[in-house]
Image (cartoon, rainbow, N blue to C red):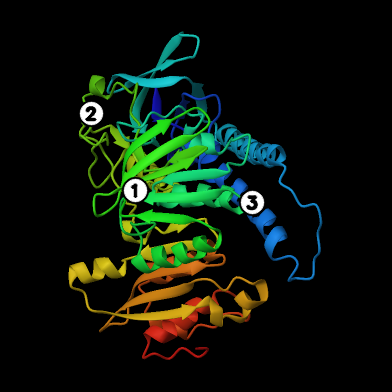
Amino acid sequence: MYDVIVIGSGPGGYVAAIRAAQLGMKTAIVEKYPTLGGTCLNVGCIPSKALLDSSEHYHNAAHTFKTHGINLSSLKVDLKQMISRKDDVVKQNVEGIQYLMKKNKIDVYQGLGSFVDKSTVKVTKDDGSSEQIQGKNIIIATGSKPSTLPFIKLDKKRVITSTEALNLNEIPKKLIVIGGGVIGMELGSVYGRMGAKVSVVEYMDSLIPTMDKTMGKELQKSLKKLGFDFYLKHKVVEVENKGKEVIVKAENAKGETVELKADYVLVSIGRRPYTDGLNAEAAGIKVNDKGQVEVDDHLRTNVPNIYAIGDVVKGAMLAHKAEEEGTFVAEVIAGQKPHINYNLIPGVVYTWPEVAAVGYTEEQLKEKGIKFKTGKFPFMASGRARASMDTDGLVKVLADAETDEILGVHMIGPRVADMIAEAVVAMEFRASAEDISRMSHAHPTYTEAFKEACLAATDNRALHI
């Protein structure tokens, strides 16, 4: 009998298992795939960042090295090697998780985990054989899968998801991305930098529509420089694979049909919770009509000894949100009183420039009727950004009009994926814009832009614009 059984070994699951083991609980983890790490490590965050880095190196070599005084000739992409390096990065990370399971004495079961009852999990191996294990507490961490539309047939050769986009054997001449969200813009960037003509079809009126509108507008400006075409407020009505060509038909706001052709179509309209094969009903667990496992504020399901975390429950589908929840649940089971402030979980888009945000957007504050002031600082005015030729983008700080407390920080620019952590720390301690503006920031650094935006929010006191 285990104290904790975790079903799923993605960032939420493996972190939950490690924290449970750290707290002295006998722990097991069940994973249906041959490798640990879930979507994030195998076909998500990690491999996509590896390809984003490789393609950014190529793009800079082709477009900015000459200005830096570095002359190259016969520059070309070796896509096979690029994919091979990505696979090696994944392998190293996956092996790292296996090491952590051993180090923390966590038993790993490879096979599909499904409920027999509320305390029993059946593990079915690929060869059809199975065994049963029992646990006092069970954590569901089964993650998500790419979503599609009912009329789109994902053949995974020409009409693909993010998973196949990580393993193409050629650079598309033309790539249509359905969905202007995070995944589409990241993977569109990978191939756009290497010469693909990318067209983005998005139903909403902005890219990255869940983020502050300013970020979507700025990202669109930057991606246009890569040759991206945008079809915003367009509804896809048909996707047809003609063999070596795919035709996408979409309706614009006036109801007129637009026809686009490409050799590949990437469907990236979000992800859906994944509970296939879990047999949740055998344990009496409630799953809602969106496919999410229903949980309370302690991430407990309607069955008291069963919890659920990560993409399979409500909230943003982010690896680091799942990690926080994994730690949270292990500590709840151990009788501790942890907390998560969901408003302060940052979101990041790893395009270049990067986009990062935490807290409320301007649109949300207006909707809530909260009076706020805004401070902005463009990277064009940053000495560090000029030195590295990364002058696209800005930092935008939203602060309470009366108390000056920082309510939201939205950044698009170089290395903002790392910079956003300062904003998270500040907001966790309920800092004011003036607090940040009076802290010394090393010069020259990109982070000075955050200080300047805070100065701008504090009586328009920015020094360098």
Residue that numbered label 2 is attached to: 285
The mark found on residue 15 in the picture is: none
The mark found on residue 336 in the picture is: 1
Label 2 or label 1, whichever comes before in sequence order:
2
Say if 420 sits above or below 159 in the image: below
Comparing marks 1 and 3, which lies closer to the viewer? 3
Comparing marks 2 and 1, which lies closer to the viewer? 2
Contact, mark 3 vs mark 2 (Cβ under 8 Å):
no
Q: Relative to residue 321, is residue 92 drawn left or right?
A: right
Quadrant assignment, res 177: top left
Amino acid at pointer 1:
Gln
Residue that numbered label 3 is attached to: 55
How many marks the image carries: the answer is 3
Say if 435 sits above or below 188 in the image: below
User: How far, Cα to Cα, is label 3 from label 2?
Assistant: 44 Å
User: How far, Cα to Cα, is label 2 from label 1?
Assistant: 24 Å
